[in-house]
Amino acid sequence: MMIKYLIWDFNGTILDDLDLSIELLNKILKKQNKPTVNKKRYLDIFGFPLKEYYFKAGISYEKATFETIAHNFIVEYQPQSLKLSLHKGVKTTLKKLKDRGIKNICLSASEENNLLEQLTHYQIIDYFDEVIGTNNVYAVGKDQLGLEYFKEKKINPLEVLYLGDTTYDYEVGLKLGVKVVLFSKGHHSKKRLMATRVPLIDKISDIIKIIEGENKNEKVF
């Protein structure tokens, strides 16, 4: 079965926002007089649901609710996210895949309007055939949105590859019934990603080789 669609996660896969995410997390922790986390600790604890991840990081909900904290995080994150960089090779990879007839789909746990603003700002929105974000700032509902999109467009999961940077992306991919490839330079440690036993890439451009291998009926997975 030929791969016709590539689903892209956004945060950590397309956008290199790791350092900003750690910085803003530590800002919350300092405000609560809690110990900050270093990059290694962050890569080992980041995940979904966000409420549980915040709790693991040491955030308390005694004086502010999770909803308030998450909302305030995004208020600070969104404008600063427009001052970052895409991961190396993202734009050229998107273009090459589009030129070869692969449909690029961005499926993110980000709120959709924020996501559209980011994709437009980084001048890559035109490479996507579809952009799918959530209707909330709590990173909830990504898997369901994907399932609904597949049903609406009558997409065969066997024709889809999913590229993300966390074990959550792996779990979403399982729910969608698609093959998953994980990127090692995002929000999870390589050790956590390797535990999924799916292909792992260190360079975004390597996804092209994987798709080519799949479409030549070579055993990549």
Image (tube, grey):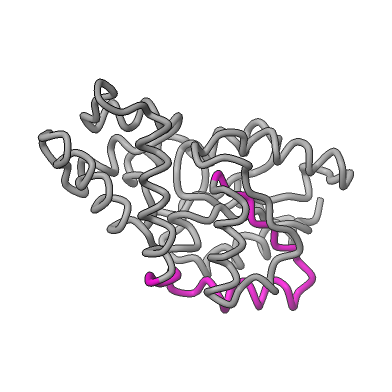
- Residue 114 x, y percent position in the rendering: 55, 57
216 relative to 24, above or below = below
Residue 196 in the image: state x and y as whole percent. Answer: 47, 35
Left/right placement of residue 170 relative to residue 40 reads right
Q: Tell whether position 166 is magenta.
A: no
- Magenta stretch, residue numbers: 83-109
In the displayed structure, does residue 26 sit left or right of residue 95? left
When the figure is inspected, residue 130 is found, relative to residue 60, above or below; the finding is below
Q: Residue furthest front?
A: 63
The answer to which quarter of the image holds residue 178 is top right
Q: Is residue 86 magenta?
A: yes
Seen in the image, is 13 located left or right of residue 155? left
Q: Position of residue 127 (x, y in %)?
A: 68, 72
Task: Classify 30 as above or below 181.
Answer: above
| Residue 35 in the figure: left or right of residue 170 | left
User: What is the total number of numbered labels drawn onto the structure image?
Assistant: 0
Q: Who is closer to the viewer here, 209 or 26?
A: 26
Residue closest to the eye, 142 or 184: 142
Q: Residue at x 52, y 50 (%)?
A: 164
At 38% from the left and 70% from the top, the residue drawn is 84
Residue drawn at x 58%, y 67% is 119
Image x and y of residue 176, in percent: 70, 36
Residue displayed at 73% across by 50% down: 160
